[in-house]
Amino acid sequence: MTAIAPRAVATAERMPEATSPGIRRRRRSPGSSPWWALVFIGPTALGIAVFYLWPTVRTLIISFTKSGPFGGSEWVGIENYTRLFQDPELIGALRNTAIYTVIALIGIPLAVGIAALLNTTGLKGRSAYRTLYFIPVVTMPAAIALVWRMIYNGDYGVLNAGLGVVGIDGRSWLTDPNTALVAIAVVGIWAGLGTNIVIFLAGLQGIPDTIMEAADLDGAGPIRKFFSITIPLLSPSIFFVSVISVIGALQVFDLIYMMLGRSNPAMPNTRTVVYLFYEAGFLDNDRGYAAAVAFLLLVIILLLTVVQFRLQKKWVHYE
C-alpha cells in the first residue's frame, strides 16, 4: 500500500489538469506575434516611404531653395511661393486645368451609359466590345497623340473631311485657342473610357438580380430602374472613378505636350499646371520654382480629394 501511493502521486502530477467543457486553453501559435505583421507589410511600407513619402518631403525642401547656374542651391525661404502666386501664368494654368478637369468628368456618365448597354442581357459579342473600348488604354500615348493630330489636322484631317460632307466648314482644331483645349480633352475622355467601362461593368454585375426582378414585378420600366436602382447601387463605383478621374485630369501633361508643341499659338490657352512645372524645371532649370509648382498641385489634389470624400456621404449608397 505504501509502495503504491508514491507512484500514484507521481502519475497524478504528470497528468494535465482537467478543464471544464466550456473552457479551452489557447495555445499561442508561432505566427501570432505582432512582429510577423511587420514582416509582411514591411516591403510595401518601405516602397511607399522610398518612392512616395521621401520624394514628397524632398520636393518640399527643394521648393524653399534656389538652384545655381552651375549646380548647387541656396536657401531662399518662401521666395519661390511668393513669386509663384504673383506669376500671371499661374492663373491661366489653373483656369486651363480646371476647364480640362470639368470636361474630362463628362466621360463618367458616358462610360456609365456604355457599360449599362454592354451589360444588357443577351447581348452578343460583349467581350469583343469590351476589348475594343479597352484598346486605347493599352495604347502608347505617343501613338494616340500622333493619330489624333492627323484627325484634327486643318488641311487633310478626317474630322474636317467629315464635316465638309454635311456642309460644315472645319477649322484648325489644335492651333485655334478657342478649340485646342476642348479637342485635347475629348482625346483624354476617349483614351480613359475603357478603364471606366470595365470598372462600371464590374459594379453592374455585382447588383443582385433579385432587386431587378422585384422592380419588374412592381411595373418599373428600364429608365426608372436605371435611375432608381442601377445608379444608386453603382454610386460606390462612380465615386471611385470620379476621384481617380479628377486626379488624372489635374495631372494632364503628355497629351498637351505631344499634340501641341511649344511653338503652337494655342499654347497659352492650353498650358496646365503640370506644363508650367515642366517649363520651370526642365526648360528654365529653376528647380526650386518647379518644386513650388509641384507642391501647390499636390495641395490642390489633396484638398479636392478631401472634399470629394466629404461629399460622398450625401450621395454614395453602400449596401
Image (cartoon, grey):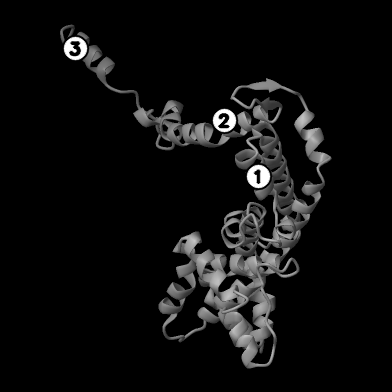
SS category of the residue bearing label 2? helix
Quadrant containing the N terminus is top left
Question: Which mark lies nearer to you, 2 or 1?
Answer: 1
The front one of 28 and 175 is 175
Tag 3, which secondary structure? helix
- Residue 196: tell me if it is visible: no
* Tag 1: amino acid: Glu
Circle number at residue 279: 1
Q: Residue at 53% x, 32% y: name it.
A: 49
Q: Quote the CA–CA distance across marks 2 and 3.
A: 69 Å
The Cα–Cα distance between marks 1 and 3, rounded to whole angstroms, is: 92 Å
The C terminus sits in image quarter: bottom right
Callout 1: helix, strand or loop?
helix
Image marks 1 and 3: residues in contact by CB distance under 8 Å: no
Q: How many marks?
A: 3
Which of the labelled discs sits on residue 54, or is there none? Answer: 2
Q: Residue at x 67, y 81 (%)?
A: 170
Residue that badge 3 annotates: 7
Amino acid type of the residue tagged 3 in the rendering: Arg
